[in-house]
Image: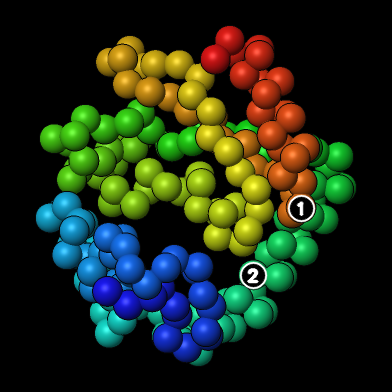
Amino acid sequence: MEHLRSRDDGFDFGIPPHHDIPTTFEAIYLNLKPQLHQAWGHIVLPGGAGATSIEAYKEALTVSRPEIQRRLNKAFVAQGAQAILQPTTPCKAPLTEEQATIHIAGQEVSYLALANHTVSASSVGLPGISLPVGLSRDRLPIGLELDAPLGSDRALLDLARRVEGVWGA
């Protein structure tokens, strides 16, 4: 397999060329669960109908991402907030056999909705951590997502330790 390197921006992930880690979208796609193939084929694989063009990707990295970072940091400062706290997922974890169909507030949604609370910060490079905080009535895990201002990784880890101390995790 080839060394993991973006074809257009030259970004090198530092994975040595001889390993068993899939390093292309196509190789990762082959190892996905069948229910994920359609979504990946549509939005992730180059050439998929919903895939992001190289131009749009570069604009997102150089224009949109910095603007979102600026706005979020401004909000953290204005509110004096150390972190945003929210459930890790917008619903309880689905059973393995129920992962193809997810319901939130009685509505059937894509399984991608499970990542809504974690993607917003991680996609713009903000530090985030998810802590286990309990179990649902069905004994499925419930997590608490903490997202913090840009560059505050150590402060977030300290906060997470304090939250774990309160929760007894």
Closer to us: 11 or 54? 11
How many numbered badges does the structure rendering display? Answer: 2
Residue at the extreme front: 18
Position above or below: 124 against 104 = below
Describe residue 169's horizontal placement relative to residue 19 as left or right. right
- Residue 67, given in percent of the width and then of the height, sits at 72, 70
The residue at the point 49 percent across, 24 percent down is: 132
- Residue 32, given in percent of the width and then of the height, sits at 20, 56
The quadrant in which the N terminus is found is: bottom left
Q: Is residue 64 visible?
A: yes
Closer to us: 161 or 56? 161
- Numbered mark located on residue 65 in the image: 2
Which numbered disc flags the more N-terminal residue, 2 or 1? Answer: 2
- Residue type at numbered disc 2: Arg
The residue at the point 34 percent across, 37 percent down is: 104
- Residue type at numbered disc 1: Gly
Q: Element type at marker 2? A: helix
**Label 2 close to label 1 by CB (< 8 Å):** no
- Residue 84, given in percent of the width and then of the height, sits at 67, 39
The residue at the point 66 percent across, 14 percent down is: 165
- Mark closer to the observer (2, 1): 1
The residue at the point 58 percent across, 38 percent down is: 129
Q: Which residue is mark 1?
A: 151
Q: Spatial distance from mark 2 to mark 1, Cα to Cα?
A: 15 Å
Position above or below: 113 against 168 = below
Describe residue 21's horizontal placement relative to residue 41 as left or right. right
Position above or below: 56 against 153 = below
Q: Is residue 50 visible?
A: no
Estimate how packed mark 1 is, as few (under 14), some (14 to 19) or many (20 or more) residues with alpha carbons within 10 Å.
few
- Residue 40, given in percent of the width and then of the height, sits at 26, 66
